[in-house]
Image (cartoon, helix red, strand yellow):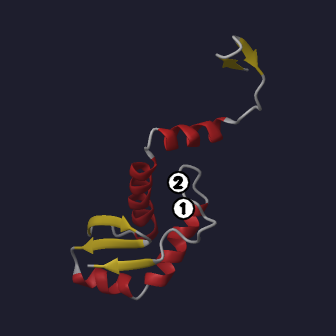
Amino acid sequence: MAYDSRTNRMRRQEAVGMDELVKQFIKEMRLDKGMNRQRLVQVWNEVTGASGYTLSVNFDKGVLYCTISSSVVRNQLYFQREAIVGQMNEVLRNDDMFIWDWQQGSCIKTLVLR
């Protein structure tokens, strides 16, 4: 039930699940970009296992920029770029807290290692 201030009455409203309410709250409070960035860093660490060598992870317009401190690790990750992008998109697609319009396509399109 929701309150209607015009008629001073309660009106019926469709029931909404908690998962949908949390997503709406995150969008309205404009927390989605910060939470998505945090989740991207976590997924990068899960998929690659290179958290000890990762200095920074930035995301801008479909491109994931990762700064790696070791040239050996960077070279190994360079040859696995497409597999890493595919695995990260799959994990993010199944994540309920990651807010992205998957109708537009994949979240991460390119991986740039520095």
SS state under label 2: loop
**Residue 26: x and y, percent?**
50, 41
At which x and y percent is residue 15?
Answer: 75, 31
In the displayed structure, does residue 25 sit left or right of residue 49?
right
Residue type at mark 1 is Leu
In this view of the protein, can residue 94 be seen by the observer?
yes
Q: Quadrant of the C terminus?
A: bottom left
Quadrant that contains the N terminus: top right
Q: Residue at x 52, y 54 (%)?
A: 98
Query: Which quadrant of the figure has residue 90?
Result: bottom right
Other residues around mark 2 within 10 Å, as few (<14) / some (14–19) / many (≥20)? some
Give the labeled residue for mark 2: 98
At 21% across and 74% down in the image, what residue appears? Answer: 69
Residue 96 vertical position relative to residue 51 in the rendered view, above or below: above
- The answer, for residue 51, to whether it is visible in the render is no
Q: Earlier in the sequence, mark 1 or mark 2?
A: 1
Pointers 1 and 2 in contact (C-beta within 8 Å):
yes
Structural crowding at the residue carrying mark 1, measured as other residues with C-alpha within 10 Å and reported as few (<14), some (14–19) or many (≥20): many
Is disc 1 placed on a helix, strand or loop? helix
Task: Name the residue rendered at 51%, 44% in the picture.
Answer: 27
